[in-house]
Amino acid sequence: MTQALPPSAPEHASALEVHQQIGALTRQLHDSLNGLGLTAKVQDWAGELPDAKSRLSYIARLTGEAAEKVLNQVDEAKALQDHIAAETRRIGELIVKDPVAAVAKGHVMNFISEVELSSKKVDAHLTEIMMAQDFHDLTGQVIAKVVNLAATIEEQLVQLLIQTAPPEAAVKAPVPHAPYVPALSGPAVNTDNNPDVVTDQSQVDDLLASLGF
Amino acid sequence: MAKELRFLIVDDFSTMRRIVRNLLKESGYVDADEAEDGAIALQKLRNSNFDFVVSDINMPNVNGFQLLSEIKKDEKLKHIPVLMVTAEARKEDIVMAAQQGAAGYIVKPFTKATLEDKVNHILTKVGLK
């Protein structure tokens, strides 16, 4: 087993230097933000970042669940297909061997019934696979919100850089872009202990029924 | 046998439009058109005949609430039932949709059975089934 070696003297000095430089940069950024009155804005971003984190977790959860659902449905549909393929071969052999007996003993009719039932089951699995694709819509709305937050922070940071740049390094302010921002709240990412949102269709129906709709 | 009713599916996500369209087809409603936002939907509604609208809420340009409001203000369109199918899960949005005249409200993600039940219930209620 290898053991971590203690840093050599030059490495240690270098790490200390980097640490001090980061500290100085942080202090400088803090002073600049205060001086420009941007502290409140930074606090707003900081407040939105946990929300962005939970939104990204929501996306990861939904995409994971959709993939899992699709793979499970495919497994079940493939098992049905394999069974039908094996049964088709078996019935084929029976018919070749003795066609009259295959019909008379009910093998052919049983096979037809089984194919019909399996087809319905496979169709249901295909519908479930289709339904699993709704994650695209739900995550797309959430991604739009996170992208909008990132764009806002980027714009504010660019403005900060422009305002604090020395005259010789002054750059022309970029034209802020206006991304599409959904005006509504979108999918409910955090439903725990939130009485203002519904978590499933039965709650929608109950709410509308309680209001006489 | 497929019913001769014409549906308009309004959603900015093509995936969701395809899902709703396929589900309606599985339920026997094969005649459906699509619009990617409320503005395009209004154009199609005014230029053609539809019996039923299935609409998202959160869309660019003209959103689902604005579309619903325009439909209910229009003498020629206000009889068309509008079923909202949306990710908006706030109670105030659900109540607002009902107050504005939505015939039903489905929150995403939903099941095939939910869509089928709501569509059939609304069609029965308005005498189209």
Image: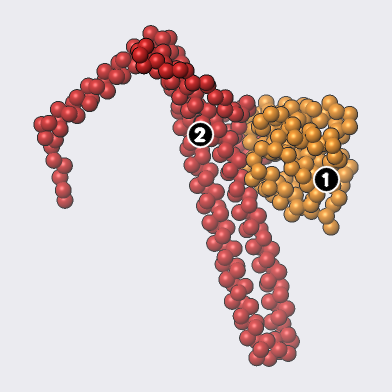
Chain colours: A red, B orange
Q: Disc 1 sits on a residue from what chain? A: B
Looking at the rendered structure, which numbered label has been put on residue A55?
2
Identity of the residue drawn at 14% across and 27% down: A13
Residue A92 at x, y percent in the picture: 65, 83
Identity of the residue drawn at 80% across and 49% down: B31
Q: On the picture, is B3 further left or further right than B96?
A: right
Image position of A77 with respect to A140: above or below: below
In the rendered image, which residue does mark 1 sit on? B6
Residue B90 at x, y percent in the picture: 64, 29
Closer to the camera in the image, B63 or A211: B63
Image position of A182 with respect to B110: above or below: above
Q: Are marks 2 and 1 on the same chain?
A: no
In the rendered image, is residue A126 in sight? yes
Distance Cα–Cα, label 2 vs label 1: 37 Å
Residue A11 at x, y percent in the picture: 15, 32
Quarter where residue A30 is shown: top left
Q: Residues within 10 Å of mark 2 (few under 14, many from 20)?
A: many
In the rendered image, is residue B104 in sight? no
Identity of the residue drawn at 63% across and 86% down: A93
Which amino acid does the dot numbered 2 rest on?
Arg
